[in-house]
């Protein structure tokens, strides 16, 4: 039976962690009766860290004109794809800052370039706030932006930028301007109507109340009832280091309780991922007893969570070890959660990865040549492009 808001509140505030886990695990087993846990081999590529949004919880972004700002070149991104394919990967999770000097044509050219070179490779790219940023920058409605990006090669939209889908919280975090709760949901609704499957996320543990966490889950459940377009839900705790907001980090126990509650409330979401990148491998493994049926991504590269102080790394061998030690068979999947096969490293020797890669090597401040082909909007970028005396 479906949980009401009152039921969910009562459960979350009064049930023991073991009870929540047992309930979530039972529901997970109903949806996924086979003892299988999936994961995907992909790479998190952050194409730029330049961002005008300035979310108070973000340690990743740099201001326009900052000497630490970067935008990756197309060739750098193609190289990252080649490395991903060599490790058995089939998609990029491509997200970045709201860079005023990257117009829609840049994304279209990149996506087309990727599909020309790697026709079977998938692009899980541009969270709803990025889509809204591109729509504002290009003065095009969101449906047109999504249609153009799909025509260029977009396969799926990641659920980033949801944080908590309550505008009071979004105003406090300074992320109301980048997307209100309705705007975030609106992009996902449009993407689903256009046939894309997407994910949904939630970042908790900052300024929100329990009531607002519930509101977030219920709004996602409502949209999923309407469109059925979400494949999975991923939650993680706010990572406070080097952020303007500061504060502390929620505990692993709170993470497991939140994950279990999500499995119980989100009865129409097929998959829940474990967030090992913020919680570490062992809490990631425990997540499999608290409602998660998927270990997320091998990831290969990570820049955003690392900037805020979390530096966990698991390569495919380690992810598979955690899944199998928890008593499940580990299977590789694609973005639609179709099973692709057994672990890649058992089919083909791949080098162990003891550290996640970064967007660029430290100190590399190179500027991609092709940026000059796209109109600059910011004063800082225009100045940089002026011929030097
Ligand atoms: S979270 Fe994203 S949108 Fe917000 S400041 Fe960071 S990079 Fe920009």
Image (cartoon, rainbow, N blue to C red):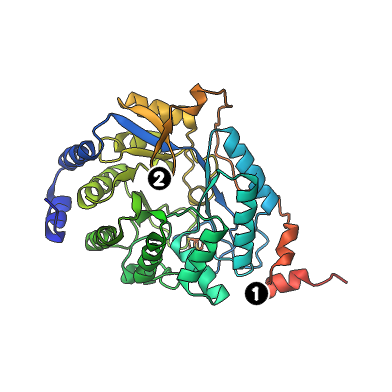
**SS of the residue under disc 2:** loop
Against 261, residue 144 (above or below) is below
- Ligand 1 contact, mark 1 (Cβ < 8 Å): no
Query: Residue sitting at 61 percent across and 43 percent down?
Result: 81
Disc number placed over residue 336 in the picture, else none: 2
10 Å neighbourhood of mark 1: few (<14), some, or many (≥20)? some
- Residue 74 location in percent, x, y? 67, 53
Query: Residue sitting at 66 percent across and 67 percent down?
Result: 65
Q: In this view of the protein, can residue 210 be seen by the observer?
A: yes
Which of labels 1 and 2 is toward the front? Answer: 2
Q: What residue does disc 1 label? A: 377
Against 169, residue 39 (above or below) is above
Q: Based on the displayed image, in which of its 4 quarters is residue 173 positioned?
A: bottom left
Against 253, residue 52 (above or below) is below
Against 282, residue 382 (above or below) is below
State left or right for residue 2 relative to residue 226.
left
- Residue 9 location in percent, x, y? 16, 57
10 Å neighbourhood of mark 2: few (<14), some, or many (≥20)? few
Q: In this view of the protein, can residue 69 be seen by the observer?
A: no
State left or right for residue 53 relative to residue 212.
right
Query: Residue sitting at 27 percent across and 43 percent down?
Result: 256
- Residue 28 location in percent, x, y? 23, 39
Q: Quadrant of the C terminus?
A: bottom right
Comparing 190 with 278, the one in front is 190
Comparing 138 with 197, the one in front is 197
- Residue 332 location in percent, x, y? 43, 33
**SS of the residue under disc 1:** loop
Q: Earlier in the sequence, mark 1 or mark 2?
A: 2
What is the distance, in whole Å, between disc 1 and disc 2 at their CAs? 37 Å
């Amino acid at each position: 039976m479906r949980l009401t808001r009152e039921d969910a509140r009562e459960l979350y505030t009064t049930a023991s962690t073991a009870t929540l886990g047992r309930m979530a695990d039972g529901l997970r087993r109903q949806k996924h009766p086979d003892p299988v846990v999936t994961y995907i081999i992909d790479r998190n590529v952050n194409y730029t860290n330049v961002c005008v949004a300035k979310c108070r919880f973000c340690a990743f972004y740099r201001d326009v004109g900052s000497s630490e700002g970067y935008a990756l070149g197309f060739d750098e991104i193609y190289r990252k794809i080649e490395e991903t394919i060599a490790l058995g990967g089939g998609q990029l999770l491509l997200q970045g800052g709201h860079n005023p000097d990257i117009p829609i044509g840049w994304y279209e050219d990149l996506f087309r370039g990727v599909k020309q070179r790697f026709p079977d490779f998938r692009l899980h790219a541009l969270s709803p706030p990025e889509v809204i940023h591109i729509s504002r920058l290009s003065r095009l409605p969101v449906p047109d932006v999504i249609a153009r990006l799909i025509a260029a090669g977009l396969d799926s939209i990641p659920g980033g930028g949801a944080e908590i889908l309550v505008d009071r919280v979004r105003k406090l975090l300074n992320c109301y301007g980048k997307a209100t709760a309705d705007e975030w949901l609106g992009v996902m609704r449009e993407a689903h109507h256009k046939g894309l499957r997407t994910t949904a996320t939630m970042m908790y543990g900052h300024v929100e109340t329990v009531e607002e966490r519930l509101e977030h889950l219920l709004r996602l459940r409502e949209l999923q009832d309407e469109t059925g377009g979400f494949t999975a839900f991923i939650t993680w705790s706010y990572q406070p280091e080097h952020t303007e907001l500061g504060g502390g980090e929620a505990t692993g126990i709170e993470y497991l309780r939140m994950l279990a509650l999500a499995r119980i409330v989100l009865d129409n979401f097929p998959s829940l991922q474990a967030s090992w990148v913020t919680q570490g491998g062992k809490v990631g493994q425990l997540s499999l007893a608290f409602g998660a049926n998927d270990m997320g991504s091998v990831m290969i590269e990570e820049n955003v969570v690392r900037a805020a102080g979390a530096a966990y790394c698991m390569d495919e061998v380690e992810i598979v070890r955690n899944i199998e030690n928890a008593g499940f068979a580990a299977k590789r999947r694609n973005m639609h959660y179709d099973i692709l096969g057994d672990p890649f490293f058992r089919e083909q020797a791949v080098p162990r990865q003891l550290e996640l890669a970064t967007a660029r090597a430290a100190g590399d401040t190179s500027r991609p040549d092709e940026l000059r082909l796209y109109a600059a909007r910011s004063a800082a970028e225009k100045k940089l492009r002026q011929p030097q005396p």
